[in-house]
Image: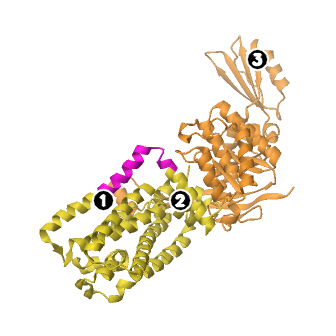
Chain colours: A yellow, B orange
Amino acid sequence: MKDILSLFFAYARSGLKSRFQYKVDAVVVIFAVFFREAGGIIAMYLALQKFGSINGWSIDELLFLFSLIFITYGIFIVFFMALRDFSDWIKHGDFDRVLLRPRGVLTQLVLCGADWLAAFGHGTLGLVLLIISANRVGVEWNVQTVLYYLMCVIGGVLIQGAVFLTFSSITFYVLETNSLKEIFYWNMRKFAIYPLSIYNKFIQAILIFVVPFAFVNYFPAQFFLQKPDMAAYPAWFMFITPIVGIVLYLAAYAFWRFSLRFYKSTGN
Amino acid sequence: METMISVEDLSKTFKIQRRSTGFAGAVKNIFHPTYEYKKAVDGISFSIKEGEMVGFIGPNGAGKSTTVKMLSGILHPDGGSINVAGYIPHKQRKEYVANIGVVFGQKSQISWDLSPLDSYEVIKHIYRIPEKLYKDNLERYTELLDMKDFIDRPVRQLSLGQRMRADIAAALLHSPKIVFFDEPTIGIDVVGKDKIRKFIKTLNETDNITMIFTTHDMQDIEQTCQRLIIIDDGKKLYDGSLENVKTDCVSTRIIEAEVENMPSGLDIENTQITHDESTGKLTVMFDTDKISTSDVMTALMSTHSIKDISIKEPGIDSVIRDIYEGRIKVG
């Protein structure tokens, strides 16, 4: 464990050092990410002033729903950025180097690829939203709820990690997976901005069973907010985000192990 | 000496999608893809002893890089067996790669925006190199590769030759027993190439490191390796000493002569004669196994008055080309 941590910090030091070779750019990136994402929220915030609520969710409750997306994504890109951009690693031959080093393949990919600046932008925005909204919607913080919130964050990170680990495994067979990512991650993420209950049954089924974004933010948020639209789903869905994360990640990992042997390397 | 690398009947086939062109073709590519199979490596066997330095040469697409990638555990072979230092590379990857260093001329392992020294720090952690060994190696390679001036400068400011030297040091910090160099001199100027070749040779002699060196540049091989393996079309064409290729296999000589009177109907048995009308140059190619050089000279001089004459031995480059193109059989 100490060994893994020291490797993680070695990667982090060199990663940050190379980003801060261009100091202005580095600072701009943090703000750019923050304001780009915040801009989307402000636009929605203004639109919602007209409606007041969506399916019984007030603006503050929606912000609480958002905050989970940003916080989990901020942590996600610390650990899973290499998997997010994995087809580039294959195409540029960087994956060969990973195979030439005496460490676990996934260990290296998870520890090395952090985009710290973007992570900082997303994470800060998530925290700001959480602080603003949690107070107003009356979340009661005690040892149990804080603990469960943290577990849900970890679960949410693992769910997204599992999705990208699966895409990365598919890369070994088809080389390019950008359109898959577009359809099954980025679009699903857009859906997850609103409460699950506003969608038709088909989209709901996808968000619960295929790309389970509902467990990243909707169901954990229900644990804290207890909105009436939860009645449409089994109540225990509120409690299983950490388990969903771990199970999905293990399944994706098994698929990854199986697929690794199909790696073909690139010509030169 | 012990056998370090043994390869038996190794083969690797790639499945390549044959792409049809045009719109109809694009549709066909999606719904009914056709594949062709290319044998990149086709039944290659060889064995390399500890401390040996072997040059791999062959034209583009001959299967050199695929072979090196299988030897280094990146690719799984389809058939045959590999054993390197007691390991089966693709099956025991993690344990195995701690023993090898790989230098890709076309793909650097040090970060563009960092100094070589910063990248080495990360490599130290990845390979778990003990502090003392790391310091000793770093000092030694900085000296041998003459890197003092640029080791703490960002890589983006270095010349290609400097970057390559920094990359070679990066592959050696963990004291590997075996090092693969995949086209390490590509694109580098003459002085830079020379530095790299000298270093590689020194390292092989003093540290007894087993090395495989792939290249297109015959000079690389001539100046570093005693043994040569020629690969083409996935097959091994030649495996033996460099000297053998030059002397035993090659008995072709070329005589170039400038003659005063135009030769007419000149024909010497066992030779090929070409004549350039505009310059009056006569070229005679022959095989010393079939006709001696003096016989050819005598025949020439008996019919022509010669202004100037030279005898040429084909360079190693053209010998290799002859081997690729099947004009010379070796083995």
Kind of residue at disc 2: Cys
Q: On the image, which quarter does residue A103 sit in?
A: bottom right
Kind of residue at disc 1: Glu
Residue labelled with disc 2: A112
Magenta stretch contains residue A29 = yes
Residue A185 on image: x %, y % = 36, 67
- Please state the chain letter of the residue tagged with numbered disc 1 in the rendered image: A
Q: Nearer the viewer, mark 3 or mark 2?
A: 2
Name the residue: 56% across, 59% down: A9
Q: On the image, which quarter does residue A200 sit in?
A: bottom left
Q: Residues within 10 Å of mark 1 (few under 14, many from 20)?
A: some
Observer-nearest residue: B264 or A56?
A56
Name the residue: 67% across, 50% down: B171
Kind of residue at disc 3: Ile
The dominant secondary structure in magenta is: helix
- Mark number, residue B309: 3
- Mark 1–mark 3 distance (CA, rounded to whole Å): 80 Å
